[in-house]
Image: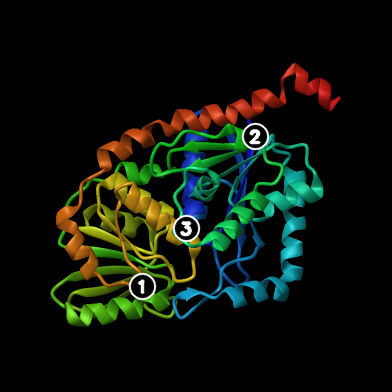
Amino acid sequence: MKILFLVQGEGRGHLTQAIALGQILRKAGHEIAGAMVGKSVGRTIPSFFSEQILVPVYEFAAPNIVYKNGQMDVKRTLSSLLTNFSSYHKGLNFINQTVTKIQPELIISFYETYGGLYNVIFRPRIPMVCIAHQYLLLHPKFIFPKNNHFNRFLINLNSKAASWLSVKRLALSFREIESRTDLKVTVAPPLLRKEVLDLPVTSGDFFLVYMTHHSLSKQIIDWHISHPEVRLNCFWDNTDASEVFQYDETLTFHRINSDKYLLMLASCRALVTTAGFESVCEAMYLGKPVMMVPVPNHFEQECNALDGVISGAGVTSKTFDLSVLQDYLPKHQDQSRKFREWYRRGENMFVNEIEAVSKKETSPAKKAIVS
């Protein structure tokens, strides 16, 4: 089957999921013809994606979250939609042109907002499967943070919009939950790149910190000044800093580098991260405790953190107060064995779910309807 990926380029989670699924589908004999990636205006897609996806990458302008002082700025995020409207409109047309050029048999969307709009506006005869952890939030048994009904409505509205007219949603989950096919929600294990699976795991003497925006580094430095004896290795997106910025003997900042990050993740004592789903999954697979710090005003990350705690990944905190992690570590129970058992069921599940779409589309009954 000839497959085209449509990937949200914000953060690294959806990019690494696309890489992982590409590895699985090629192994099963399918062709990945290309990857269309939506990115914010002025931002570049991390080099690891083009290096590891192994297909032509087609970039286009897409909406993104705007941050200010380390937190999500809702007003600026909404205003950017109007400011860059013409670029976003071109991006939607670019998707249609690319699909027309490549002529795939299936489109797989990794939570790219334009996926649903593309289906509604252009009405392609090509089926679309949508994959993301966010679709798990549509499941009636998902547990949300308390007193956030409006935010819950908004994120689920966005998830429905991103998957308008898709044939199914594959909802990635930390743990097994029964699927709800009546809601087009099939619960599936996380997608992890094979590079993660082959890592040798050791227990080092440092905490690894991954932050989605370098402005969050101030909190890390403030805590470090009071706890200089704790060794910290931090990854950030600060392009103004050198590849490796040595703050002092026990605090080091690294420019985001996928290979270096994974090696340090496999050898750290624990991970501190801004509650991105993918980072938590990698840590759980490697048996590393996690402190999840949701970006302020980022409801999706609040949900990830709560779900991660329920799944035994670790502890959550509103700030980068690493003392919370220190207090938690003696109580942590390793979930890696249970998590790996759930993860290993994924390869066959993804192949079967995706191939089922092809069989349905080419069935005699389907052909009769189309003709």
Dot 2 surroundings within 10 Å: few (below 14), some, or many (20 or more)?
some
Pointer 3 and pointer 1: residues touching (CB < 8 Å)?
Answer: no
Q: How far across and how far down the image is residue 17, in percent? A: 48, 47
Q: Earlier in the sequence, mark 1 or mark 2?
A: 2
Question: Between marks 2 and 3, how big is the CA–CA gap?
Answer: 25 Å
Quadrant assignment for the N terminus = top right
Q: Can residue 11 be seen?
A: no
Question: Can you name the residue that lies furthest to the front here?
Answer: 147
Residue 15 vertical position relative to residue 66 in the rendered view, above or below = above
Looking at the image, which residue is at 34% across and 81% down?
Answer: 218
Q: Which badge, 3 or 1, comes first in the chain's sequence?
A: 3
x and y, in percent, of residue 284 in the image: 30, 47
Relative placement, left or right, of 93 versus 39 is right
Residue 283 in percent (x, y) is at 31, 51
Quarter-wise, where is residue 265 in the image? Answer: bottom left
Q: Residue at x 18, y 74 (%)?
A: 250
- What's the residue type where badge 2 is placed? Lys
Position of the C terminus, as image quadrant, is: top right
Task: Tell which of 238 and 14 is nearer to you.
Answer: 14
Q: Is residue 341 visible?
A: yes
Task: Tell me the residue that label 3 is attached to.
Answer: 12
Q: Position of residue 72 (x, y in %)?
A: 51, 72
Residue kind at label 3, given as amino acid type: Arg
Look at the numbered disc 1 and give the secondary structure of its residue. loop
Q: Which mark is residue 117?
A: none
Q: Which mark is residue 243?
A: 1
- Helix or strand or loop: what does disc 3 sit on? loop
Q: Is residue 244 left or right of residue 39?
A: left
Write down the residue under mark 2: 2
User: How far is the residue under mark 3 from the one under mark 1?
Assistant: 19 Å
